[in-house]
Image (cartoon, helix red, strand yellow):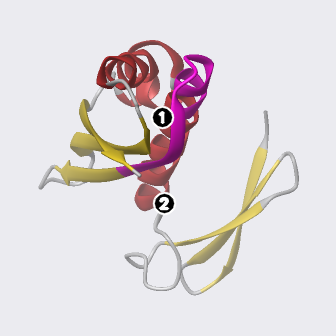
Amino acid sequence: MKAEVKWVGDELFMGTSESGHTIVLDANGGALAPSPLENVLISLGACSSVDVVSILEKARQNIRGCKVEITAKRVDTVPKLFSDIHLHFVIEGNEISEKHVERAVKLSADKYCSVALMLNKSVNITHDFEVKAV
């Protein structure tokens, strides 16, 4: 896997993936685009959500929506690394089994989400969920 990041001016950078997709990143606290660390949180949420949705669909759960709200704390010293990240999954659907959701979230965190597994080495990652009937 390869990627390229190019400075485009001020504190803006354009990342291009091997598959040709681009994303703009803003090192200036996310003023014009997500900052690199905001992008890490977004990537973690996307990676985990892919797993959760896939596992719930394979379990034949009538899932209609999945959202993950992510909160993070950073240390006060430079570099300002993440110390804690919490993922709160909101699963929408009809007759969704909380047991299946709990299992899906746990499997993503412990076994499948590569982003979470990489971050787990230095960051305390926690998660919970709620199920909403629609």
Q: Is residue 134 visible?
A: yes
**Residue at x 46% of width, y 67% of height:** 35
For the residue pair 69 and 60, the one nearer the viewer reads as: 60
For the residue pair 125 and 80, the one nearer the viewer reads as: 125
| Res. 110 mark | none
Instruction: Tell me where the magenta segment starts and ends, as one range.
Output: 53-68
Element type where label 2 sits in the image = helix
Query: Where residue 58 appears, x then y in whole percent?
Result: 62, 18
Identify residue type, mark 2. Pro
Query: Where residue 124 appears, x then y in whole percent?
Result: 21, 30
Residue, far left: 76
- Closer to the N terminus: mark 1 or mark 2? 2
**Residue at x 43% of width, y 15% of height:** 107
| Res. 48 mark | 1
Residue 99 as seen in the image, left or right of residue 6: left
Q: Residues within 10 Å of mark 2 (few under 14, many from 20)?
A: some
Task: Work out whether 122 lies above or below 79.
Answer: above
**Residue at x 28% of width, y 44% of height:** 88
Q: Which residue is mark 2?
A: 36
